[in-house]
Image (cartoon, grey):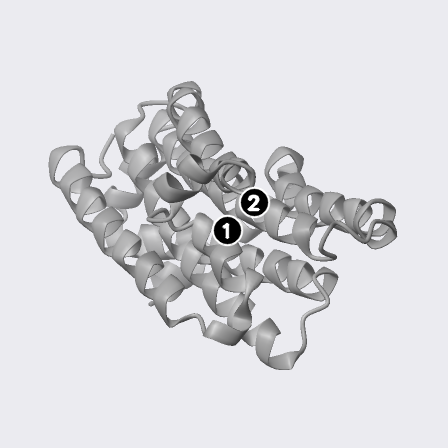
Amino acid sequence: MRAIKAIFIKQAKDMLKNFSVLVMFILFPVVAFAMTVLVARGNPDIPDNMFTLMMASIFIGMALIQSASAVIAEDRETKALRFLVIAGVKPHSYLLGIGGVIFVASLFTSVAFGLIGGFNQSEFLSFMAIMVSGAIASIILGATIGIFSQNHQAAAGLSMPIAMILGFGPMVAQFNERAERIFRIVYTQQINVAANDFSVGIAQPLMIVWINIAVLAILFAFAYSKKGLRN
């Protein structure tokens, strides 16, 4: 627990100093707010929360995957993991520390999305439940990509196409029925599915997201068995 806390604090300080990472947690809700105020609320044909859900899906699918993969790949490149292993820090402690910082940061961003979306109390809680679950899935996927990547550039090259598909896929699915059928099983799409009609509940969307998490956890376990966290 002491190692997890130390890594968490170190990574939190590093994130506050890293503008390129920090801006991703701020930019998406800012864009959602601007598009909601300037476009959605002045157009009766556009739902008020359309841009909120769109940006939330892109944030979960892009920002978190790229953040997690970049952090781990950078530590592999700089040999920081080797020193952590020598110091007796276990791999799971490292992952919990790194992932915990990204997860907490995503909570603040998710709250911002929820406030911009104008949800009532029960809708807000449901929205947060699906966002938190999606964040866990993306962090696991990003960590897996980071393990497979030898350096920051490799992580960026591998994570970008995956993040773009998962991030922008739900937006395409809003306008294309075939894409909607394909992305229905993808966790980022479930943010739109759940928030578009809270009256039917979020049990099914959450179930799909957690099935995604289980599959990604198996993928991570495979990556760890093959590559590990050692440099």
Query: Residue 16's x, y, as percent?
Result: 64, 47
Q: Position of residue 140 (x, y in %)?
A: 33, 48
The residue carrying pointer 2 sits among few (fewer than 14), some (14 to 19) or many (20 or more) residues within 10 Å by Cα, namely many
Judge depth for marks 1 and 2 and give the one in front.
Answer: 2
Residue 137: % across, % down: 36, 52
Task: Using the image, tell me which numbered label, if any, was put on residue 225.
Answer: none
Is residue 219 toward the left or the right of residue 116 in the image?
Answer: left
Kind of residue at disc 2: Phe
Q: Secondary structure at mark 2?
A: helix
Q: Residue at x 63, y 33 (%)?
A: 20
Q: Are marks 1 and 2 in contact (CB under 8 Å)?
A: no
Q: Is 224 on the left or on the right of 6, as rendered?
A: left
Which residue carries the number 1 mark? 10
Where 142 falls versus 199 (above or below)? above
Mark 2 lies on residue: 59
Q: Is residue 95 above or below residue 69?
A: below
Establish if 185 lies above or below 83. Answer: below
Q: Quadrant of the C terminus?
A: top left
Q: CA distance from mark 1 to mark 2?
A: 24 Å
Where's residue 112, x and y in %? 68, 60
**Amino acid type, callout 1:** Lys
Residue at 46% across / 63% down in the picture?
130
In depth, the one of 171 and 124 nearer the eye is 171
Q: Is residue 165 visible?
A: yes
The residue that appears at 31% across and 65% down in the rendered structure is: 207
Sequence-earlier tag: 1 or 2: 1
Quarter of the figure with residue 1: bottom left
